[in-house]
Amino acid sequence: MTTPVQEKIGGLNRLLLLSLILSSAASYSYIYMFHIVIIPITMIMFLRIFRDISIPKVLSFDFLFFVSFAVWYIISISWSENKVYAILYCIYIIFGILTVLYVCSIARSSLQLRYSISFVISLVAIEICLSILEGLRVVRLPFSPYSPYREYFGRSPIDMNEFSEGLRDYIEALPTGFMGNPNNLASFLVIMLPFFLFHRVVLIRVFGSVSILTVVYMCGARAALIAYGIVVAVSLLCWGASVRRFMGGVLLVVVVPIGVLAADLIKESPYKRLAEVGATGDAVMQMASLLLEQPSSVPLNSVGVRTALIMNGLQALRDTSGLGVGAGNSRLVQERSGIERLREIGSMHNFWIEILVDGGVLIAALFACWYLYFIRRLWSVGKNADQQILRYCGKSLSVGFIGFTIGAIGPSSVIYMLPMWMLVGFGLSVIRLHGRRRSMIVVRDHLTPLDGQGAGAYA
């Protein structure tokens, strides 16, 4: 029998979750707190594996996917032109998969899942508050790339004197949170948004949704802003009581046209962030039209550069007949571009195209199948679970990862985003716990009463 103490998450597990949320905020140079914490956890994991190597049937497809994903990228090192990029990318993948396994092992019961999620939400709430203070220029976190104190963390800060006064004022108001990057911060908070929207405490719902929207706006992350809208729309239309869904639909019908009209008015605003928000729709349409042009003919604005990165990557994919350029070598593709701006950026800035270009058509299709299957199962848990914590996590994670399909387009790459891998681990924990409870119910319902004890004794 499991005691209440055993049901709680231990100090080492809390330290792991803390290191995942802090990410680059708890690092020196390229050594993260996470890298140190995983050493004893890895030893414990291997001991558990040797004791019990069984894999839950409900997660067998996920296990095969992650093994296939990692093995393919490791094999791709053989045809990757830049072996250093390929090896580094494979290390990111291995750390990501280990994170998934570790987090999945933390939440081995519904109570442990509840403690873990509550702990993570508390840490994210702190990050949100600090990010807003950064955006208001009240504080600048010392590990931010825009902080002069970053050199004490083993990294060189960005020289703000290289920018014009207007651009410098804009950058100095960009929040970076624990991520050290505005786009990564906004993308992660979009996944976390449903945990606040579906919280049982109304005050937390309001605080979370408004605060995350504020941070996304301050980050100037248009992809995350679109993802935020998708998350809110799905939450209003697909979850809750029928009356709430109806009111949500009416609200969207009213708000969307007003938003479109307001966007048309504010895109000429002298305030850069407001102008960016207003021009979001135009940016989407511009990218769609530029994809039909040649990379050398696109304008070198934000949309044009992202479009050219995609076009370069897809051309490299065609050159390999769909095999892919190998792990991490989409960066090499951009570094060889004839456009200087693309050579400076390097990264693909679109996670889905990055997987397609690096891993090839086959691995991209496999990833897409797993991702959709992952979301579908979480959605089912949110609808059908008999425990409140499983329903809460199931619908929060399913809606969050639906939004992430757009949110992942903003950052340079999310392959090294530890909190994202952490949430995947929680998702698999939710699926496993729900599968276990369903199995117990099936066994209970099929027990034959014996000596006066039957199904009722297990109820």
Image (cartoon, grey):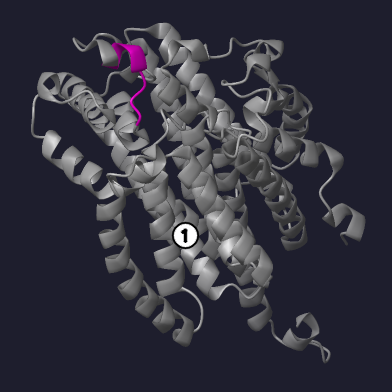
Above or below for 432 versus 367: below
x, y (%) of residue 160?
Answer: 51, 15
Q: Residues within 10 Å of mark 1 (few under 14, many from 20)?
A: many
Is residue 371 visible in the rendered structure shown here?
Answer: no
In this rendering, the answer to whether 141 lies above or below 131 is above
Instruction: Report x, y in % for residue 366.
Output: 34, 41
Q: Does residue 95 appear to the left or right of 225 in the view shown?
A: right
Which quadrant is the C terminus positioned in? Answer: bottom right
What amino acid type should be assigned to the residue bearing mark 1?
A: Val
Q: Could you tell me which residue is drawn at 41 percent across and 55 percent down?
A: 373
Asked which quadrant contains residue 152, the reply is top right
Image quarter (top left, top right, bottom left or bottom right) of the N terminus: bottom right
Determine which residue is flagged by label 1.
Answer: 399
Quarter where residue 5 is shown? bottom right
Residue 164 in sight from this viewpoint: yes
Q: Which residue lies at the image location 64% right of the left edge and 30% below the top edge?
A: 23
116 drawn magenta:
no
Identify the residue at horizontal 46%, vertical 87% (top origin). Answer: 243
Relative image position of residue 26 (x, y in whole percent): 71, 26
Please provide the residue range marked out in magenta: 342-349
